[in-house]
Amino acid sequence: MSVRSMVWMTWLLVIASVHAGAASAQTRIFRDDFNGAAGSTPSQWWVEDHYQGRGKFGQAGWVNGSGAMDVSVGRYNASAPGVLAQTSMRTQRLFQPSPGRVLDFRIRARIWGQDQRGIVTAFFLYSQGQRNGAFRSDEADIEWLTNAAANRTDDSMLISTWHNWNRDDPHYDIDQHPQFGTQISRLEPLGFDIGGWQTYTIRWGQGVLEFFVDQPNGQWRYIGGYYGGQVPTQPMHLFVNAWAPDSSWSQAFDASLQPTSNPAQQAWHGMSVDWIEVLDRPSPN
């Protein structure tokens, strides 16, 4: 091989190495620090507007005095008297992991878990549509139930996976049934107070759905996961919300939470969100 050929081959190896490094690098593909007056960045989120549980969505989050965005349930609802005012936002864009890579959906949040039972705050992925002869959904959830946090300092969070779940014929706690799909949920102990600022992660890849919480030393602690056919496969939006379930979800319901028709009696319950981001990175498996 000539000197010129050797130089040319060396350059090809350098270029290939650079491209391989770029392909494997971590990339932030979404971020909102909720610094605007309206809380969320309007170009990145939609505000949901529908009834669910004991209330109606329709209000956006807003920036509080500490610079975070409050996502909450209000006892007084000016637009729908007699029901609770609820907050739910979803990203305008859809997400789906590429082969050989995972998406890390991260939130830094503080849950108001001590003041009122009957509230669910959530950070989750979701999509729905007609497929396989039924109206079906895919979903991956982190949910904080105030019923599991009231008067405690060692709290839990609910993690769930839903894959091809049949909303026309719903059966819960079903794993990979050809008619009903998959729905598996479990309440996982965390070992700390969710009322403090914590960072949580949903990791989604092909055949892997895992949940983590940041440690004080910067390491991530594995909370739980689902694998193989239990994992959602459809493109999904990212959501953050706060709402109040009715008595059909007994684990999360509390009758002491009541709406009011008097605006002077307004009270808010939910969580504060410092930031949300999505990272695209090589699969660690």
Image (cartoon, rainbow, N blue to C red):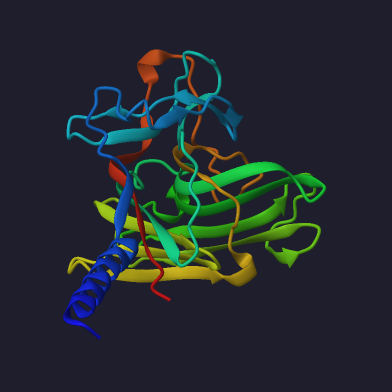
Quarter containing the N terminus? bottom left
Q: Image check: 203 left or right of 193?
A: right
Q: Image check: 94 left or right of 37?
A: right
Asked whether residue 160 is in view, the answer is yes
Counting from the top left corner in percent of width and height, residue 197 is at 24, 51
Q: Nearer the viewer, residue 10 or 154?
A: 10
| Image: 113 above or below 217 | above
Counting from the top left corner in percent of width and height, residue 268 is at 37, 30
Counting from the top left corner in percent of width and height, residue 248 is at 66, 44
Q: Image check: 152 left or right of 209?
A: left
Q: Image check: 238 left or right of 167?
A: left
Quarter containing the C terminus? bottom left
Q: Residue furthest front?
A: 2
Residue appearing at x 25%, y 38% in the figure: 33
Q: Nearer the viewer, residue 246 or 272?
A: 272
Asked whether residue 111 is in view, the answer is no
Name which quarter of the figure residue 60 lies in.
top left
Name which quarter of the figure residue 184 lies in.
bottom right
Residue appearing at x 29%, y 34% in the figure: 69
Q: Nearer the viewer, residue 150 or 80?
A: 80
Label tally: 0
| Image: 85 above or below 205 | above
Residue appearing at x 81%, y 58% in the figure: 179
Counting from the top left corner in percent of width and height, residue 152 is at 34, 58
| Image: 137 above or below 215 | above
Q: Residue furthest bottom?
A: 1
